[in-house]
Image (cartoon, rainbow, N blue to C red):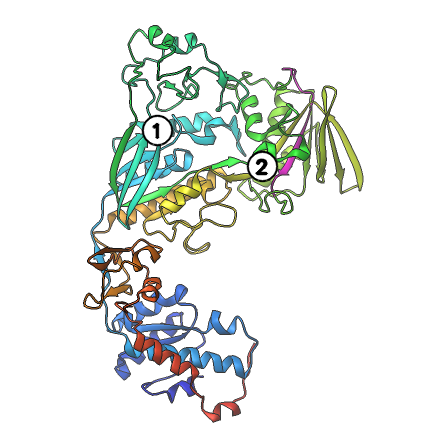
Amino acid sequence: MAEELSRHPGVVYSTHYDYMCSDPGQELLKKAIKEHRLNGVVVAACSPSMHEATFRTAGEEAGLNPYLVECANIRKHCSWVHDPGEEATDKAIRIAKSLVEKVKGNVPLEPVEVPHKDKCLVVGGGIAGIQAALDVAEAGFEVLLVEKSPTIGGHMAQLSETFPTLDCSQCILTPKMVEAARHPRIRLLTYSEVEEVSGFLGNYHVRIRKKPTYVDPEKCNLCGDCEKVCPVRVPNEFDRGLSQRAAIYIPFPQAVPSSYTLDEQACLGLEPLRCSECARACEVGAIDYDMQEEIIEEDVGAIIVATGFELYPLENMAEYGASKVPDVIDGLEFERLLSASGPTGGEVRRPSDGKVPKSVVFIQCSGSRDPELHKPYCSKICCMYTAKHALIYRHLVPDGKAYVFYIDIRAGGKGYEEFVTRAMEEDRILYLRGKVAKVFREGDKVVVWGVDTLTGKRVEVEADLVVLAQAIVPSSGVTEFAQRLHMSLDEHGFLKEAHPKLRPLETLAGGVFIAGAAQAPKDIPDTVAQASGAAAKAVALLSAPLLTHSPEVAAVDEELCSGCGICAPQCPYSAITVDEVAQVNEILCEGCGTCVAACPSGALTLRNLGDEQLEAMVEAALEELEPARAAVEVKGG
């Protein structure tokens, strides 16, 4: 291949090396540039998405403009998809020759530079959002922390204890919540949602809608008189519907901000006002029925998305009697039953009759790892929190018995395997390896039909309570939110990272980072670690004097442009505006070429990929190869 390319017009030096991305390979490239006074380089090797920056940096260190260095992708486009042989070698030669023709037409370019805002938006007030906000704020930057519910804390606030240490969840979370609320560089916006995002890397304009709570937090002294006189009772979402709350309520005692919220949907009516019992009971006059929603507009330089997760709805599990059998509940409902601040004060009680369950069946992988009916992926944390549930249940109900149906145990984390082993060895906790076929009610019992695959026998358990370890799914509304930020979603609806190995915290939207279960199911340690990682990425961006962007973007020839506007709606990055003639925002443009193909007048071109270059590349790829090539014996694997 190197021999054939050495005969191509314009090539003055051609060689081969096994590992071009290594230090010796890069030194070979630098030495060739200097010795042969090269004004263009083609490295025929790996994917440019992986190594283009490596080779361009090496070229720049040798005194060559980095945009005169190109990568011919003979790895993914040739060796990965073809068996070794003459035809594969021929294709690799043609790919490399086409890139030689491209680099001949390249011109030196300089990165696009732009100033940026010094503020960060964090969307989601769970543990991921809290940790990210605190890290960015501690680095010296202003933070907007937006949470759609009346309090921060997320699902972690609903937990009784955390695995594998069995720490009180509220005990380790509440200090973080209070710190975030009191931090001088964090502006906390609860009961708020991001409605609109416009702009580009380092210069985003966000529009936030803050709903009215109808309670002045500055006046509210948390006396609770308003809640006592409220005539309305609705299911308490914090307790997963296992208790009732008033229309005016505080989500839980440690809520931050610590203030009451009037639920407009549950209230008897505000327009017209049908009940004013809470206002009459409030001696400090904190109730304000005239409070209006507020639109907040801010400019930010970076965005961290930590929108969290929800559980796969119980009503989807008809085979397990969910939503029909009251004593079939999900893991978060069981957490509230175990919690000392829960609806039963930490006593495990059946939802149907309030009795203490003497036998509980835990079903793992409920809705997970089931490509035929439900979700195909593993929800990662279910094995661990089921073990935790079984251990805490046995502690609270010493004469109770727990049955755990599992497919297999996945305990990947520090101390996790030991924790599961502890549960398995606990007296009166029985692990049964096998799937559950059916759950139904018979009298005051819940009958579970399953199989023990280790013994090959059918199993029937008459239980007092069944707990389903439901699949973890993305939060509602994340699809619409992702569209506003031009973020990608994976096939399951989770936010998609730019690269699963090398850019797990970034998205393809510049300056937008992800953290926590918004990306995929994960436990608290992984969530906190990723949140701090996303914060570090945001801080690096906000700390830069100027932001840079590749100059290989679309350019407009204003003399040819008729201002027809066909290009603008075609751009997937909203990088084009039309005012008499088309204008390209070089920071937003990713050089995809969609606008170039759509332009009827040929006014749009891509820098370093013009029509003449494309024609030369096609001709080089189609030209006949030297007859001597056929005599070369190709070896390799």
Counting from the top left corner in percent of width and height, residue 99 is at: 37, 77
The disc, 2 or 1, on the residue closer to the chain's N-terminal end is 1
Q: Is residue 295 above or below residue 20?
A: above
Q: Is residue 530 above or below residue 246?
A: below
- Please name whichever residue, 139 or 505, is drawn nearer the observer in this view of the structure: 505
Q: Quadrant of residue 125?
A: top left
Quick check: 307 left or right of 374?
left
Determine which residue is flagged by label 1: 190
Point out the image quarter for the N terminus.
bottom left
Camera-nearest label, 2 or 1: 1
Asked whether residue 361 is drawn in magenta, I would say yes
Quick check: 476 left or right of 261?
right
Point out the image quarter for the C terminus.
bottom right
- Please name whichever residue, 254 or 484, is drawn nearer the observer in this view of the structure: 484
Counting from the top left corner in percent of width and height, residue 422 is at: 63, 34
Determine which residue is flagged by label 2: 384
Q: Specify the segment rendered in magenta.
A: 353-368
